[in-house]
Image: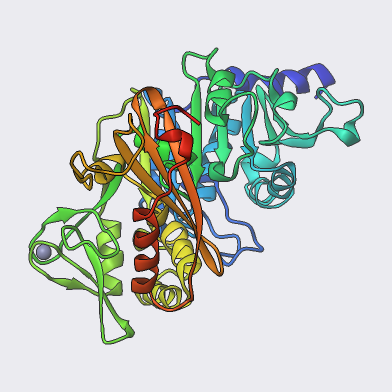
């Protein structure tokens, strides 16, 4: 073949319409798992992780403009994205921007799992070429972008902390991987910056995936703007359909007996039937996604993927109960890790949460005979606990934010909570107002 004929042969597939093949069908037909992985070069099989089928296919659905996957570790988040990227490269090529928390993460992915997928999948190996993209950099070696090109497009990988390097890139598809760990940028939130990159395309798609960390954190906030799909299981005894939680009796939940992880079962909220590990896998195989909210953003789909529906890796009910018991024995940090990385639920720090209406409900009326500067209509007290004393500050609040303050140290011994409360109350009630406050002037 002469060079121009070879070029035409290489470029022409880019102008073919996408075949009548979904992403999950493409994965079964073409995708091979790396020879170095535990599956030793086996073909991709959708039955291995049935809950991933709809998520992959959503990435090929023109009505879907945003996919938010809030998932546990070991549920196959990355493989689902690899399948979508592989399909796009081969059958529906375009520019794809794939961001990771850092450039090092992007390098690891580019040379590791992504390179493995391309190498082990024959239909990709023949069309994809990789290199560093020297865009906006003085030399190729300093580039913070990695590029894999194929006829009709290229895939750019970059870190979230270098917005300038991808600011000029317009991409039909953008992926934010481990979104919760993205750098906080002066330019605005990362999801908006990425959405701007795809906004020029009528069929642009933004994919955000991550394990969550905190309530209202980046991935949880994104998930809440979607239709919040949960994976519905059907009870083998009564056919009741519901999603699964860890311990909520209103839904499927995990139960076990007498500190014995091997007794772990999935319990039906309707009839109490208990499903063992093989039954759990059958339930997942027969499951389906169902929206549990109305998306604020039309075209935004959310998928919550807890480890209880995972059928890959070494995930079993017994292993999850072992992890749960170990986390409970080790304290809040381990519990937080279990909740976020196994349950894919954001962690709520209850200590940091103060509800204004709960405070207002505790207001007491002290009547008119109270020792406070004229003009004070409300008192608040704050206590800072030091190793040997409390720093007690009482503030009298007037209209328009006018205030009078008294701060004093109250020594304490480390005895009991009750003794502490007595010291605090005594000091709050003995507030010494500044002399000039008696006239009602503001200090
Ligand atoms: Zn049942």
Rendered location of residue 422, percent (x, y)? 34, 67
Compared with residue 255, is residue 433 higher up or lower down, i.e. above or below? above
24 sits left or right of 115 in the view: left
- Kindly identify the residue that appears in the image at 72 percent across and 32 percent down: 162
Rendering quarter of residue 193? top right
Q: Residue visible at 47% across and 59% down?
A: 341
In the image shown, does 159 or 134 lie closer to the viewer?
Answer: 159
Residue at figure coordinates x 64%, y 31% from the top left: 185
Quarter of the image with the N terminus is top right
Q: Residue at x 43, y 79 (%)?
A: 415
Q: How far from the left and from the top, in percent, is residue 311?
A: 40, 63
- Does residue 14 appear to the left or right of 359 in the view shown? right
Q: Is residue 152 visible?
A: yes
Q: Is residue 98 above or below residue 401?
A: below
**Image quarter for ligand 1:** bottom left
In the displayed structure image, the side of residue 290 where residue 190 appears, left or right = right
């Amino acid at each position: 073949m002469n060079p121009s004929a070879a070029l035409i042969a290489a470029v022409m597939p880019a102008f073919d319409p996408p075949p009548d093949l979904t992403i999950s069908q493409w994965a079964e037909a073409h995708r091979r798992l790396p020879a170095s992985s535990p599956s030793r070069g086996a073909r991709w099989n959708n039955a291995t992780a049935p809950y991933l089928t709809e998520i992959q296919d959503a990435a090929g659905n023109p009505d879907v403009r945003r996919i938010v996957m809030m998932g546990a570790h070991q549920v196959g988040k990355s493989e689902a994205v690899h399948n979508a990227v592989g399909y796009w490269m081969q059958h529906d090529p375009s520019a794809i921007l794939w961001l990771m928390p850092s450039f090092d993460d992007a390098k690891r992915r580019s040379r590791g799992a992504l390179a493995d997928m391309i190498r082990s999948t024959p239909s990709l190996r023949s069309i994809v070429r990789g290199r560093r993209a020297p865009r906006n950099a003085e030399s190729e070696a300093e580039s913070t972008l990695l590029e894999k090109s194929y006829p009709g497009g290229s895939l750019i990988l970059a870190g979230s902390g270098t917005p300038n390097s991808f600011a000029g890139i317009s991409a039909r598809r953008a992926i934010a991987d481990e979104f919760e760990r993205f750098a906080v940028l002066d330019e605005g939130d990362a999801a908006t910056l990425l959405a701007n990159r795809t906004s020029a395309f009528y069929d642009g798609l933004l994919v955000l995936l991550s394990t969550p960390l905190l309530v209202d954190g980046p991935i949880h906030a994104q998930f809440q703007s979607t239709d919040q799909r949960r994976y519905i299981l059907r009870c083998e005894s009564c056919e009741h359909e519901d999603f699964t939680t860890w311990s909520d009796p209103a839904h499927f939940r995990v139960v076990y007996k007498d500190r014995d992880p091997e007794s772990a079962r999935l319990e039906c909220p309707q009839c109490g039937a208990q499903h063992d590990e093989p039954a759990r896998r059958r339930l997942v195989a027969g499951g389906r996604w169902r929206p549990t909210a109305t998306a604020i953003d039309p075209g935004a789909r959310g998928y919550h993927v807890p480890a209880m529906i995972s059928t890959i890796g070494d995930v079993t009910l017994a292993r999850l109960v072992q992890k749960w018991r170990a986390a409970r024995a080790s304290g809040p940090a381990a519990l937080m890790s279990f909740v976020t990385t196994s349950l894919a639920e954001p962690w709520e720090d209850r200590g940091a949460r103060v509800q204004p209406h709960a405070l207002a409900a505790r207001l007491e009326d002290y009547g008119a005979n109270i020792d406070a500067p004229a003009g004070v209509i409300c008192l608040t007290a704050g206590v800072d606990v030091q190793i040997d004393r409390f720093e007690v500050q009482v503030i009298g609040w007037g209209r328009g934010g006018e205030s009078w303050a008294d701060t004093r140290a109250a020594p304490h011994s480390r005895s009991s909570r009750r003794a502490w409360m007595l010291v605090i109350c005594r000091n709050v009630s003995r507030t010494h107002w500044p002399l000039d406050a008696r006239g009602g002037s503001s200090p």
